[in-house]
Image (cartoon, rainbow, N blue to C red):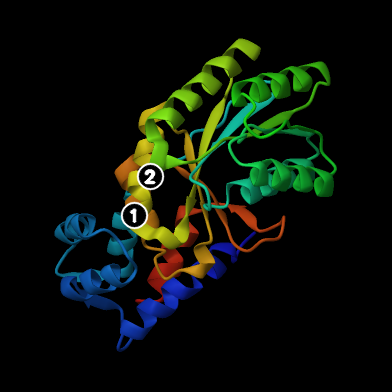
Amino acid sequence: MFGFIKKALKKTVENIEESVVEKKEYATKEEIEELLIEADVEYDLIEKIVASLPNKVNRVSLKNELLFLFTPAQPKQVDAKPFVELILGVNGAGKTTTIAKLAYRYKQEGKSVILGAADTFRAAAIEQLSKWAQRLNVPIVATRQGHDPSAVAYDTIQKAKAKEIDHVLIDTAGRLHTQSNLAEELKKIVRVCNKAMEGAPHRKLLVIDGTQGNSAINQAKAFDEMVGVDGIIVTKLDGTAKGGALLSISHELGLPILYVGVGEKMEDLAPFDPNEYVDTILDAIFK
């Protein structure tokens, strides 16, 4: 879906272009530093980038430095059926909508999907995911608020095995203000998934709100310490001028950004392409 990243970075690019007096073939280190600050790249990382650049910076030299910061995505394990993914993230990051978008993607690929509503802390989360399941015409395992989320995860995987479903997407709670409780809950879900199917969950994906910029890094670190994160999905990127934070997030965490989300429609999720991302930023700087 070429152009998706460009759409997602629209506000970030506009912010950079406002600071660029005139696009040229070379820029100074100081100019690059200022422009990366405008895009919300973390300052310590900017210092590292600039230190590696020549005095006269051209597009190629900056592109190489920026691409180097992204952690390449490892190929996912495709021989597991069902392929179980645990979706993590704080409340409000767009987790439930992202699960729906992933389910839609898998269905478009001709795969079968089942959802597990294991965020039993919030009745609204169960209700929202159930509505998406209905819209997408996919099965869901859901229960009442306060029920054991691990039991939901277990039942979802068992149902997927019995019905030979390809993909399992399990929602989880995201209340970081009770971090120790959440950590124990998530660890238990991971253990129970493995009991339901050895090796599950096969991927733990963290959903991050793009409008939070670099402040999302601490959230990501917290989840990574709790259960280990395999990849990141960034949402709401089109609503912010902080698109440069993706450089910091990927570099700081050593985790691949797998998808970016823009908008509320089911199709509004695309695989993240570091090349397109960097080129979009460079187009705003160089002619």
Q: Disc 2 residue type?
A: Gln
Q: Amino acid at mark 1?
A: Ser
Question: The N terminus is located in which quarter?
Answer: bottom right
Tell me the residue at 28%/62% (across/down): 61
Say few, some or many: other residues with alpha carbon within 10 Å of mark 1 (under 14 / 14 to 19 / 20 or more). some
Residue picked out by circle 1: 215
Across and down, in percent, residue 162 comes to: 81, 16
Q: Observer-nearest residue: 10 or 124?
A: 124
Residue that extends furthest to the bottom in the rendered view of this protein: 21
Between 256 and 40, the residue placed more toward the observer is 40
Q: Which residue is mark 2?
A: 219
Q: Name the spot of residue 15 as percent of width and height, x first.
A: 38, 78
Q: Is there any visible trace of residue 105 in the rendered image? A: no
Tell me where residue 77 appears, x and y as whole percent: 59, 25
Quadrant of residue 222 within the rendered picture = top left
In the rendered structure, the answer to whether residue 240 lies left or right of residue 198 reads left
Q: CA distance from mark 1 to mark 2?
A: 7 Å
SS class, disc 1: helix
Q: Is residue 200 above or below residue 271?
A: above
| Quadrant placement of the C terminus | bottom left
Residue contact at pointers 1 and 2, CB within 8 angstroms: yes
Q: Which residue is drawn at the image coordinates 65% and 51% (left, top)?
A: 97
Tell me residue 144's x, y (percent). Answer: 71, 32
**10 Å neighbourhood of mark 2: few (<14), some, or many (≥20)?**
some
Q: Nearer the viewer, residue 31 or 121?
A: 121
Residue 56: which numbered mark, if any?
Answer: none
Dot 2 lies on which element? Answer: helix
The residue at 62%/31% (across/down) is 146
Q: Is residue 105 left or right of residue 45?
A: right
